[in-house]
Amino acid sequence: MLTLPRNSNERTDASSGRQQADGNEPLVLVVEDHDDTRFMLEYLLGRRGCRVAVAEDGEMAVRMAETERPDLILMDATLPRLDGLAATRRIRQTAALARVPIVFLSGHAQASFRAVALATGGDDVLAKPFELAQLERVIERHLGKPRL
């Protein structure tokens, strides 16, 4: 059984930013405005050994990317205040973030959205709903295999 936290104050140790002794855990910025999806991603990334930062809209995503310097960004395409494409364009304007992989999470499964997302500066697109194995493959492609 998978038990997810009910609110943002109930996070797993890995997603609250607590580092292990070596401090080498990758930091993933999850940009998602839907609570269920965000909590699921936080939980799964934490189980994988990642630290997790969370943004609930595009403007917050840009600010957090600039201050947190994540190793990977999982970006919802449809967000309040600033959509995922516009947020990605802004993030790519920061030299230090130019090579940070950005994976779009989108309900738009069409090839046309994928082309736009990649042209905007995204590195990958994962269509919602997705299977856990699909998410793991995408994360592994950009962060490598998890350390056990």
Image (cartoon, rainbow, N blue to C red):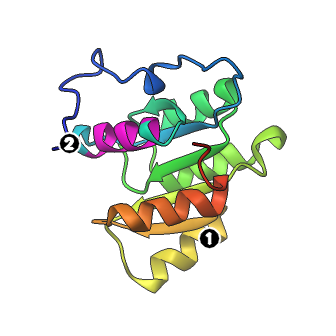
Q: Which of marks 2 and 1 is in front?
A: 2
Q: Position of residue 71 (x, y in %)?
A: 67, 41
Q: How far apart are marks 2 and 1 (CA)?
A: 33 Å
Q: Position of residue 123 (x, y in %)?
A: 64, 64
Name the disc covering residue 2, or none.
2
User: Does the magenta portion include 41?
Assistant: yes
Give whichever of discs 2 and 1 has the lower sequence position: 2
Tell me whether circle 2 and circle 1 mark residues in contact (CB < 8 Å).
no
* Nearest the eye: 21 or 33: 21
Which quadrant would the N terminus be assigned to in this image?
top left
In the image, what residue occupies the spot 59% across and 19% down? 19
Span colored in magenta: 37-46
Rendered image quadrant of residue 42 = top left
Name the disc covering residue 145, or none.
none
In the image, what residue occupies the spot 56% across and 39% down? 28
Q: What element carries label 1?
A: helix
Q: Position of residue 125 (x, y in %)?
A: 50, 68
Q: Is mark 2 on a helix, strand or loop?
A: loop
Direction bottom: furthest residue: 111
Left or right side of 15 for 2:
left
Direction right: furthest residue: 95
Which quadrant would the C terminus be assigned to in this image?
top right
Q: How crowded is mark 2: few (under 14 residues within 10 Å), some or many (20 or more)?
A: few
In the image, what residue occupies the spot 33% across and 40% down? 38
Name the disc covering residue 118, or none.
1
Indicate the amino acid at tag 1.
Answer: Leu
* Nearest the eye: 99 or 140: 140
